[in-house]
Image (cartoon, helix red, strand yellow):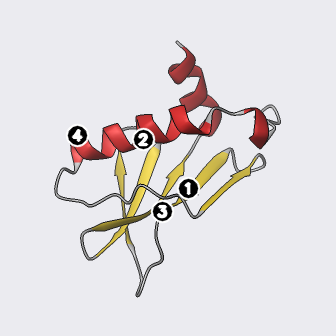
Amino acid sequence: MAYQDLLAIDLKKIIRKVVDRISKEMPSLIIHERVLEVSIDPDLDLLYIRFDKDKEAALGEYIGEYIHVFSDGGRVIAVEITPFSKFMRELKA
């Protein structure tokens, strides 16, 4: 993956796209509007977004090709997008 500057990424657009996808694929899950953490790991080609704190071990499930949703008690805790470079190319298309 070409190195990306986290500050140069349109996080609102990415989060909106991810939330829309989760709402469509997993409508019973609650997604908080606040974002607690965002990090990018270029070596793993991964973008991580944390929405809430987990009380126990969150369960993970893939939706689509790139989005891995972690949930706990019907709430979305975090999302990993990998490979992030491919997700970004499709988002720009």
Q: Which mark is residue 41?
A: none
**Which residue, as the protein is rendered here, is positioned at the far top?**
93
The residue type indicated by label 4 comes to Lys
Question: What secondary structure is marked by label 1?
Answer: strand
What residue do we see at 52% from left, 12% from top? 93
The residue type indicated by label 1 comes to Ile
Towards the viewer: 78 or 85: 78
Q: Dot 2: within a 10 Å radius of its alpha carbon, few (fewer than 14), some, or many (20 or more) residues?
A: many
Residue 25: percent from left, percent from top: 23, 44
The quarter of the displayed image where residue 84 is located: top right
Quadrant in the picture for the N terminus: top right
Using the numbered discs, state the Cα–Cα distance from disc 2 to disc 3 in whole angstroms: 12 Å
Q: Earlier in the sequence, mark 1 or mark 2?
A: 2
Q: Dot 3: within a 10 Å radius of its alpha carbon, few (fewer than 14), some, or many (20 or more) residues?
A: some
| 52 horizontally vs 24: left or right | right
Question: What secondary structure is marked by label 2?
Answer: helix
The residue type indicated by label 2 comes to Val
Q: Which residue is mark 2?
A: 18
Using the numbered discs, state the Cα–Cα distance from disc 1 to disc 2 in whole angstroms: 10 Å
What residue do we see at 51% from left, 21% from top? 90
Using the numbered discs, state the Cα–Cα distance from disc 4 to disc 2 in whole angstroms: 10 Å
Q: Determine contact: label 1, label 4, CB under 8 Å.
A: no
Q: Determine contact: label 1, label 2, CB under 8 Å.
A: yes
The residue type indicated by label 3 comes to Phe
Q: Which mark is residue 24?
A: 4
Using the numbered discs, state the Cα–Cα distance from disc 3 to disc 1 in whole angstroms: 7 Å
Q: Which residue is mark 3?
A: 51
Q: Which mark is residue 49?
A: 1
Question: What secondary structure is marked by label 4?
Answer: helix
Q: Determine contact: label 3, label 1, CB under 8 Å.
A: yes
**Which residue, as the protein is rendered here, is positioned at the far bottom?**
56
Using the numbered discs, state the Cα–Cα distance from disc 4 to disc 3 in whole angstroms: 18 Å
